[in-house]
Amino acid sequence: MRRTLSLTYCLTLGLALVGTAQAAEIRVFAAASLTDAFTELGRTFSAKTGHKVTFQFAGSQVLRTQLERGARADVYAGASLAQFTPLERARLVSPGRFFASNHLVAAVPAASPLRSLNDLTRPGVNIVIAARNVPAGEYTQRMLEQLGTSGAYGPTFPARFMKNVVSQESNVRQAALKVQLGQADAAIIYASDLTPSLRRQVRALPIPAQFSQNVRYVLAPVRGSKQPQAAQAFADFTLSAQGQSILRKWGFGAP
């Protein structure tokens, strides 16, 4: 009996040591708009696999620049092909896969008298948007161009809107935060940025679907990763049924 128990203990200890040896630590560079969803997704992934995930959240353009300058990461997840494609062409990342979608909304304080996009062009309205080199800013500029040529809002709409812009932020979460803190009357953000905590203080002015932009998120393992299998496992989990369920919970659409 004693020998059997000893053998069982040794086998159990051996399996535990193997599991520990196989566990990896990976670093994921992810767009700021993914903060809440990826934080939960990372916890779930770690619980399932034993791999540890650390995140760096920032504007997709900031993360791209860091990779181009040699920063170490294992996975890149961005909100724009315009930021991803140069990384792929430079062979800094593996071929990408779309994993989520999003669209733009106008966020205003819950008690705001602003009710429509046209209201945002009233004199004295302070608007915050993402900077032009940020994916959310890129989509916002595209939206304004389409609104100006649609015939529904008038050709001067983009100019009147931009006249009210008082700040252009380095990521979309900062734009949302300024409305939450009462530092702006409105912001153009992603629908997913209206998190449950934010909705208590902020509401959305819907943007007509034909103008709200089809935002597509793309991710890929980073070439040269020291943990390529764990990086690929994280990418696969993001696209799995469980990963997609977490993304939907936080307001993202299907890829």
Image (tube, rainbow, N blue to C red):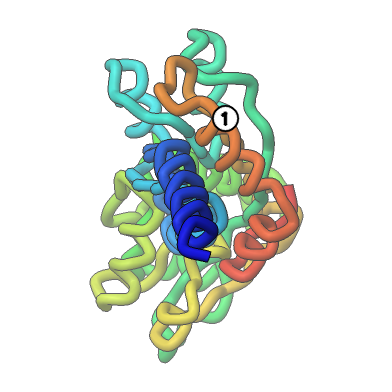
Foreground residue among 201 and 116: 201
| Residue type for callout 1 | Ala
Q: Residue at x 54, y 75 (%)?
A: 204
Left-right relation of 193 to 129? right
Which image quarter: residue 48? bottom right
**Residue of label 1:** 220
Foreground residue among 176 and 19: 19
Residue 224 horizontal/vertical position (percent): 43, 15
Left-right relation of 158 to 181? right
- Residue extending farthest to the top is 90
Q: Residue at x 51, y 38 (%)?
A: 77
Residue 250 horizontal/vertical position (percent): 57, 67
Graded by Cα atoms within 10 Å as few (under 14), some (14 to 19) or many (20 or more), the crowding at tag 1 reads many
Residue 242 horizontal/vertical position (percent): 68, 60
- Residue extending farthest to the bottom is 111
Which image quarter: residue 182? bottom left
Q: Secondary structure at mark 1?
A: strand
Foreground residue among 6 and 9: 6
Q: Looking at the image, can residue 164 be seen?
A: no
Q: Residue at x 51, y 10 (%)?
A: 91
Residue 209 horizontal/vertical position (percent): 74, 59
- Say above or below: 221 vs 16: above
- Say above or below: 88 vs 74: above
Q: Residue at x 57, y 74 (%)?
A: 205
Q: Looking at the image, can residue 45 be seen?
A: yes
Which image quarter: residue 149? top right
- Say above or below: 57 vs 126: above
